[in-house]
Image (cartoon, rainbow, N blue to C red):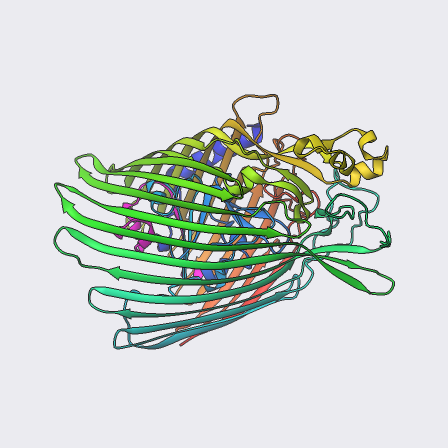
Amino acid sequence: MNTQQYFMIALLAILSYPLSAAENAELEEVIVTASPHQKSAQEIAGSFNVLADEELQREAASTLGETLQNEVGISSSSFGSGVGNPIIRGLGGKRVEILQNSSTVGDASDISPDHAVASEALLADRIEILRGPATLRFGPGAIGGVVNVIDNRIHTVPFEGVEGALETRYSSNGDAKATLGRIDAGYSGFNLHVDAVTRDSNTISIPGSAHSDAAMDDEAESNGTMENSDSRADSFSAGLSWVADDVVIGFSYSKLDSNYGLPPASHNHEEHDEHGEDHEGEEHSEESEEFVRIDMQQESYQTKLLVTDLGDFLGQLDVDYAYTDYQHTELELEFEPDTGAGTVMIGSLIESLSHNLRAELTHNEYLGWRGAWGLQISDRDFGASGEEAFIPSSETFSHGVYWLEETELALGNLELGLRFDQQEISLPGQEIDHSTVNAGASWFFPINQQQRLSLVLSHSERAPAAEELLSNGVHIATNSFEIGQSNLGKESANSLEITWVFRDADNSPFNARVSAYHNQFQRYIYLQDSGLAFSHDLEEGGLEGIDACSADLADFDNSAEELAESVGCFTYQQRDASFSGIELETSWSLTDTQRVELQGDIVRGRFDQGANRDIPRLPPAKVRASWVYENDHWHAAINLTHATAQTRAGQNQLPTDRYTKLDGSLSYQQDNWSIFLKGQNLTDQTVRNATSFLRDIAPEAGRNLTVGVRYRF
């Protein structure tokens, strides 16, 4: 860590002692997914985040990562304006499980950074971010945590009558518009839910050039816009449930259509056919513009059976089944500026059919213990076709069982968890099997009426995914040649987290939460930039994988230009590594209507051995200070976020500069309607996201003002 980062930690520690980390009003509600016994937030060990109600309405954005990026310990891995996937404590992809109503989303966002999460934050009732033993309930290897988007499309609590909401919002940057609506109706135990949203945005504005100074070339222009950054999305879902005294039966259907562009410089490549030869008979103007767009569709079906009273010993049975049909097409578009004529070619088509069954049975207190047993079975049939398909078709079948138990001790609450999983990846002529064991323990200790302490220990194992094992080809969207390793072993991590919470009373002027954690990885899997470029000449000579990559001009027709325009080679590697970090949240009430909040987080990731030990694409240290005014009708906030420079960018990666960003919001609420105004990056700062693969050529959006109106009935 550098001097500035140490200073930030010291400052936060001093300020956090009397004030520390805020547990906002939402933390009082029951967090259903964090515990099979529906414990309140005050009884949950470890750190967690909840975004709900008016706060969720203010933070909701077009991507899940952008929606959650202001939560402590969470950042967004952007890939242009259409993609923003959550990063938790520096971990993302396969290490963060994304759920929709406790079932796997079933998209391809964990395969590649250019794939968006197929979940609509604008329709969510609540978003929960879980860590610790509770993550064992939802899948193996969620070392970073679990993000559960809850939209209540299958009602589990009966109600009578009709209620709903309509909302429309407009954003100045990109001329973005979004309209959504939902309706819920209940009669004699039957409940209906219907919602829909449509979003549309044009080219976004950025401060200055898309290219950083280090990545600037002769063709880069400072035009203040990000080409090909327009997007649109339409989503619809409906659910029907029957709720009796002890039984809930429900079914839901959802459909998502999304089309978004990728920054132009992310996919520059030469035109070659599937054998690596230049196209003959085709003329490509040097002035022509090439773009890549992602056209994504997903349909999902979910069913639920909940039996809430099974007797004196057994508690409830909860069975969820989800079927998801997902596909997206990577489209290559080429336009002639002079004539406007264009051609469209399908670079690759990715299809995924997935089944996910999760059943959980709880038991009531027996000999001082209460707990749950669970079963999870998933099957994913993955297919890829087209000239740019870099992952072979495969089927991944996994099944696992888990067990959670907890008891009250003289010195607090003890929770234990254990999970066993088996994964089988099948493809023609080959089968790859892995078994994993995950275990966790948490201890929750009330020090006094104001303070509590919790300790979380866990051992996590993750089997390598199909793309990490089998990738071998050019991925057009990321402008890279990705190379998997079929001999990768399972990844494991031993983790420790200590959390201290101060909360004097329900209306205490001072609230605090401080968490410190350490994750020690064995065989950490990561995508390494080799510093080499893919050579079609070497491929034509019969070489494959990394052997077809070079930095020698002789392998590129002795042309420095051809070498510079060739895609870089990235290989999946394994090395032992460690992640350590601190998270702080504070809240201090100045008056009955005003408070100040302070939060900060820092994560440091390093490989245990090697010449370059910095893990690539980690978020920088960040501090966020807020002033909040709130009464019965008005809510106003001014937020100042400072991120340090990320000078430890990793091998062959460029660093990012520090930035200070000013945001604000203002809203007015009545019983059945509200209006809000939100300003982002008000000083129009250049922000380059250190977790993004495209940070050198695609900064975050510039100044943006959003106004919205919501009506409830």
Q: What quarter of the picture does the C terminus occupy? A: bottom left
Is 570 left, or right, of 61 in this rendering? right
- Magenta range is 28-55
Provide residue 74's location: percent of width, then percent of height: 49, 45
- Of 505 and 105, the residue lying toward us: 105
Name the outermost residue toward the front. Answer: 429
Look at 57% across and 27% down and name the residue there.
3
Look at 16% across and 35% down and name the residue there.
410
In magenta stretch: residue 17: no
Observer able to see residue 52: no
Provide residue 630's location: percent of width, then percent of height: 43, 60
Provide residue 365's location: percent of width, then percent of height: 15, 46
Q: How many marks?
A: 0
Is 519 left, or right, of 261 in this rendering? left
- Of 257 and 646, the residue lying toward us: 257
Q: What quarter of the picture does the N terminus occupy? A: top right
